[in-house]
Amino acid sequence: MTDVGPKYNRGRFLVATGIALVAADLATIRSANAAFGTLKQVRAGVLSAGYIDVGPDDGPVVICLHGWPYDVHAYGDVAPILTAAGYRVIVPYLRGFGPTRFLSSDAFRDGEQLAFAIDTVALMDALKIDNAILAGYDYGGRAANIVAALWPERCRALVSGQGYLIINYEANKQPLPPKDELALWFQYYFTTERGRLGYTENLRAFNKFMWHWLSPKWNFDDATFERTAPAFDNPDHVAIVIHNFRTRYGLAFGDSEYGALNAKLQAYPVISVPTITIATDFDGANASGASYRKQFSGKYAHRIFTGYGHNVPQEDPKGFAQAIIDVDHFS
């Protein structure tokens, strides 16, 4: 078991209200995932984590981590390709999404980048998975990057949408050219009270708009969005999302207990595991991967998926799945 600090190794029990909340959600989520896989729930660290687990039990494990504002359905077409190739595929709902719940009503609703990585390790521990191929983008890709950087023994190989995603908070305070700042409008919006209220009151409409904003060439239909939309009804969703974006600009802070781990992240840790990074039209000037190539010291490849946006596994599932299969051959 990877040591991520005493808080995540202490015994905890589901509070009665937490059990009720999870049970109430399961019917809706199971129905939404009927064609994808059976929803399971496991106590992992500070969470009761909901996840999909498909493929042979004895197959090499791939953990696919979704981003914001998406959910496990981002991998609905990736998973069958991987299971057909013999992989066991685990797709968890991140904290603040779907049926994933905090075990304690008093737990800090921490949305900082490190929290999602610690959750990933806790899930692996709970499922007795020593190491796995980690694949993700956005929140999930950042979590996968952090696990690969801090606990490389747990990460057999990495597929990272949008490249090197670990945020250096001091560097993130520096301004960008105006046209690049424009692309971050929603992050600045979330740093305000108006933004928090707006996200709370217009949750589904806001996230549907973001699907269009982040992937302008993705012609998804209403049914596709509605399969994911219930994941935003999680009672911690707004708190996690707002806290995540505020920590990026020094307007909120994560758990002080993990100061030493956060200090390591602020030093731009190099990732040594075999890696394929993926860029799309969403990445703009960074699509070449040149700006972060030096952050990967192991066997490495960079791919550009032209014509796609932010939600790359759902927009190009064949390409994303192939990257996972290919990176496995690196190791």
Image (tube, rainbow, N blue to C red):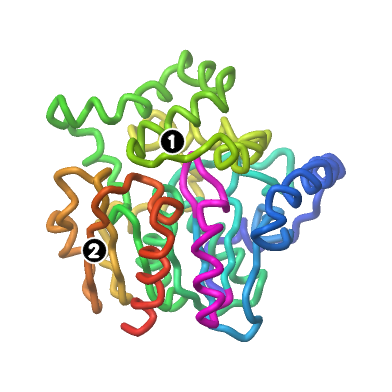
Tag 2: Cα neighbours inside 10 Å, few (<14), some, or many (≥20)? some
**Which element is circle 2 on?**
strand
Amino acid type indicated by mark 1 = Trp
Q: Which residue lies furthest to the top in this view?
A: 194
123 or 8, which lies in front?
Answer: 123
The range drawn in magenta is 66-88
Q: Residue beneath label 1, please?
A: 211
For the residue pair 279 and 158, the one nearer the viewer reads as 279
- The numbered mark, 1 or 2, whose residue comes first in the sequence reads 1
Residue 75 colored in magenta in the image:
yes
According to the image, label 2 marks what residue?
A: 303
Q: How far apart are marks 1 and 2 (CA)?
A: 22 Å
- Towards the viewer: 116 or 330: 330
Task: Residue 10: name its quadrant.
Answer: bottom right
Where is residue 258 drawn, in percent x and y?
A: 47, 53
Residue 18 in the image: above or below residue 202: below
Q: Which residue is drawn at 42% across and 71% down?
A: 151
